[in-house]
Amino acid sequence: MSSLSSLLGPYATQALSNAPLTTASPFSVPAISMWIAVRQRFAQFHANLTLTPLQFLDGVTKRNGVVNCLNRHYHDSFSETDNSFLIGSWGKDTAVRPPRDVDIYFLLPAAVYHRFQAHLWNRQSALLQEVKGA
């Protein structure tokens, strides 16, 4: 206790030496009952959040279709993955049910940037309308 008292200080040492070994309160929950089935409950909670195989396949299919379309329009390529990568929950592999969206980062050619920089106003809106049209 002497080495512990040097670390804790005089007030904590006095509190420890005066504290009973077991304290029972009428409002306390037995410690053992709080942890019963925590592992099973967490496993069920995790299973309820995890995407089903069909939801995952649907998200991947939609991503591949969008990237393929943008690659054909901007890069003359038929790739489903080039010039893009997943971001957000799909990129971090933390997507949960129900899947709402798939966030994609797509790299446009520099010529597209310069073309839209030449617009006097509504550059972003014009770009989004072009991407939507593609």
Image (tube, rainbow, N blue to C red):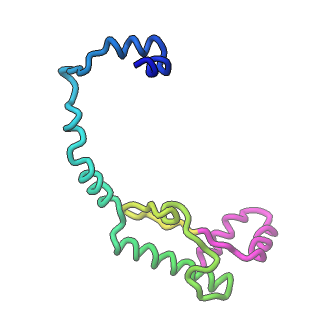
Find residue 59 and report its image quarter: bottom left
Look at 21% across and 48% down and name the residue there. 37
Look at 51% across and 81% down and name the residue there. 65
Look at 68% across and 69% down and name the residue there. 126
Q: Give percent across and percent down for residue 128.
A: 63, 69
User: From the viewer's perspective, is 104 left or right of 36?
Assistant: right
Look at 64% across and 84% down and name the residue there. 73
Q: How many marks?
A: 0
Magenta stretch, overall SS: helix
Please name whichever residue, 22 or 116, is drawn nearer the observer in this view of the structure: 22
Q: Give percent across and percent down for residue 134.
A: 60, 80
User: From the viewer's perspective, is 34 left or right of 73?
Assistant: left
Q: Give percent across and percent down for residue 92.
A: 51, 62
Please name whichever residue, 26 or 89, is drawn nearer the observer in this view of the structure: 26
As drawn, the residue found furthest toward the front would be 2
Image vertical order of residue 8 relative to residue 41, above or below: above
Image vertical order of residue 134 relative to residue 100, above or below: below
Q: Is 11 one of the magenta-colored residues?
A: no
Q: What are the residue bounds of the magenta stretch?
A: 105-134
User: From the viewer's perspective, is 43 left or right of 75?
Assistant: left
Question: The N terminus lies in which quarter of the figure?
Answer: top left
Please name whichever residue, 9 or 34, is drawn nearer the observer in this view of the structure: 9
Find residue 45 and report its image quarter: bottom left
Please name whichever residue, 70 or 131, is drawn nearer the observer in this view of the structure: 70
